[in-house]
Amino acid sequence: MTKHTPGPWEAHIIPGFKHSSVTNSNPRDPSIDIKTANHAADASLIAAAPDLLAALNALYKACEWRANQEGGDFGPDIGPAAEMADAAIAKATGAK
């Protein structure tokens, strides 16, 4: 599993500029300069990534708890979403 840089991260978006940056609260971690057509949206998404991963992990664990209470199967109502969450967590953590 690849270790990712933990948050919190902060997006720095300056209207009118053609780039944005994302910084980590740890000054030893590098900042990221984003020079894409969607730099503001990309910077915001990158800055939110640690929070999104934590939320997805919590939701997946809640789904697992529910499945265990109901015989170990996610069921048709949450099964597809749980599979997507598991794949996204694996991709984000390098486990895939």
Image (cartoon, helix red, strand yellow):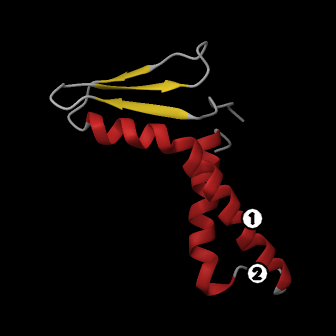
Q: Indicate left or right for 25 with 60 as reference.
A: left
Circle 1 residue: 61
In the displayed orientation, state which residue is furthest to the top.
28
Say above or below: 92 vs 72: above
Say above or below: 59 vs 20: below
> Residue 73 got which mark?
2
Q: Residue at x 37, y 35 (%)?
A: 43
Coordinates of residue 20 in the picture (x, y in percent)? 31, 27
Please name the amino acid that badge 1 sits on.
Lys
State which quadrant residue 35 falls in.
top left
Q: Residue at x 58, y 25 (%)?
A: 25
Please name the amino acid that badge 2 sits on.
Asp
Q: Nearer the viewer, residue 67 or 17?
A: 17
State which quadrant residue 95 falls in.
top right
State which quadrant residue 76 falls in.
bottom right
Q: Indicate left or right for 91 with 35 as reference.
A: right
Q: Nearer the viewer, residue 10 or 87?
A: 10
